[in-house]
Image: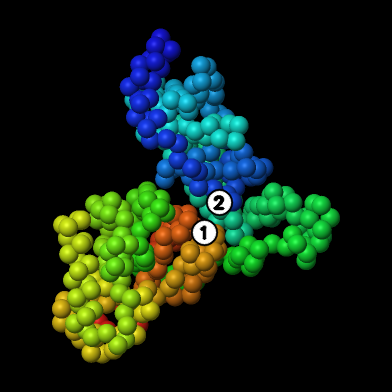
């Protein structure tokens, strides 16, 4: 019976799935924890982000009471009366009631990777993404484990040793596994050191955080939008006025998912206010053709304070509101873990409203996930920039 069902589903889904192809995994150095245990770190156990979803080897769930069996190239995972059947080769997944899902399994590194969100939802498990000791940890739990904060406090040493073992570094004497001094060619990269510790009980926290993204959308933006959707947050996307740099489908998706579209001027202090308005008008025409809307929210790549009073007067008279970021996340300069830790540190230093700028780097989606989770843990509300708000900018221009 099951073989017959598989053949039917294969016939229905195979053509479409094969046409899509398997996406290349986006891999960053990420550890996996099951309840209160850190798993050994290797390329064959590290989580992967595929098509905007987080995946882990199916063996992670086997450690949480989920039974696994394989027949005819199909992996069956079962627990608590629920079953998920994955065919990595043919790209389908269905449950015991023949409901199909859009997140198939993938064969990589000699094992089968399955989607964390789908499996946790089906089998009554939970997962979270944490930053511990400057490293990213994906934690899957069954309800019997300690809290995330207690886990983070207890496991920083274990995580450091696990990372050092993966990199071939001895934490005891600073030498590598091949005997080379850590002061020599095997020294850690500067970006891997001096990551600030995240304070989980800060004395201060922002009154509100506005998430903003600067620059032209690119191949990394889809993952950013996926992360925002999963976290239930909206943001403002400041697009360069040179609309030739835009990715049309991504701009449409930004608008469709309820985010604020805004424009980014690369302003010349010698340009007239009328010339700046003309740039914005042309960009807005393109925006209207793509999305049916225009925007009056503007930022300047070098900061609104670089505009002259005359330039600001003309822009404001034309109906534009000027915004600046007050804090840069650093996601285009370093790792997601560093961006998160440094952003959280800066959050703990203020009670004011923060306008946080992010970008479209390969680290951005993971940084957003970590920052968003921290905001949720700390009860920091997020907001969406709109014309109804008093603008925040370096020129102290509130009109």
Residue 393 appears in view: no
Indicate whether 395 appears above or below 199: below
Which residue position is annotated with label 2?
28
Q: Position of residue 115 (x, y in %)?
A: 46, 37
Horizontal and vertical percent position of residue 123: 46, 31
At horizontal 20% and vertical 69% (from top left) the residue drawn is 282
Which residue occupies the foreground of this view, 115 or 35?
Answer: 115
Percent x, y of residue 114: 49, 34
Of the pair 79 and 59, the residue shown nearer to us:
59
Q: Residue at x 55, y 51 (%)?
A: 28
| Circle 2 SS class | loop
* Circle on res. 336: 1
- Can you tell which mark lies on residue 189? none
Q: Is residue 25 visible?
A: yes
Q: Give SS at disc 1.
A: helix
Quadrant where the C terminus lies? bottom left
- Residue at 43%, 32% in the rendered image: 104
């Amino acid at each position: 019976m099951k073989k017959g069902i598989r053949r039917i589903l294969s016939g229905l889904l195979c053509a479409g799935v094969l046409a899509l192809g398997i996406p290349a995994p986006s891999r960053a150095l990420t550890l996996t924890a099951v309840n209160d245990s850190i798993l050994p770190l290797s390329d064959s156990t590290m989580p992967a982000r595929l098509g905007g979803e987080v995946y882990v080897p199916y063996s992670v769930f086997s450690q949480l009471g989920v039974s696994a069996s394989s027949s005819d190239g199909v992996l069956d995972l079962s627990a608590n009366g629920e079953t998920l059947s994955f065919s990595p080769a043919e790209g389908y997944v269905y449950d015991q009631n023949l409901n199909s899902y859009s997140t198939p399994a993938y064969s990589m590194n000699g094992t089968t990777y399955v989607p964390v969100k789908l499996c946790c939802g089906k089998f009554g498990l939970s997962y979270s993404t944490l930053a511990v000791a400057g490293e990213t940890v994906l934690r899957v739990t069954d309800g019997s484990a300690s809290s995330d904060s207690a886990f983070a406090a207890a496991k920083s040493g274990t995580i450091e040793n696990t990372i050092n073992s993966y990199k071939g570094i001895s934490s005891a004497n600073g030498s590598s596994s091949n005997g080379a001094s850590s002061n020599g060619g095997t020294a850690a990269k500067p970006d891997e050191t001096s990551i600030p510790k995240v304070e989980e009980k800060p004395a201060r926290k922002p009154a509100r955080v506005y998430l903003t993204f600067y620059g032209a959308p690119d191949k990394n933006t889809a993952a950013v939008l996926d992360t925002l959707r999963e976290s239930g947050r909206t943001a403002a996307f400041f697009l360069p006025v040179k609309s030739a740099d835009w990715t049309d489908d991504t701009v449409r998706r930004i608008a469709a998912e309820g985010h604020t579209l805004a424009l980014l001027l690369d302003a010349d202090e010698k340009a007239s206010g009328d010339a700046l308005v003309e740039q914005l008008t042309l960009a807005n025409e393109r925006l209207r053709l793509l999305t049916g809307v225009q925007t009056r929210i503007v930022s300047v790549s070098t900061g609104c304070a670089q505009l002259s009073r005359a330039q600001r007067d003309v822009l404001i008279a034309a109906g534009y509101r000027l915004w600046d970021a007050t804090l840069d996340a650093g996601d285009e300069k370093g790792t997601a873990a560093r961006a998160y830790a440094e952003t959280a540190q800066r959050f703990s230093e203020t009670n004011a409203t923060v306008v946080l700028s992010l970008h479209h780097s390969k680290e951005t989606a993971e940084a957003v996930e970590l920052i968003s989770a921290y905001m949720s843990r700390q009860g920091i509300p997020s907001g969406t920039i709109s014309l109804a708000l008093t603008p925040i900018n370096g020129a102290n221009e509130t009109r």
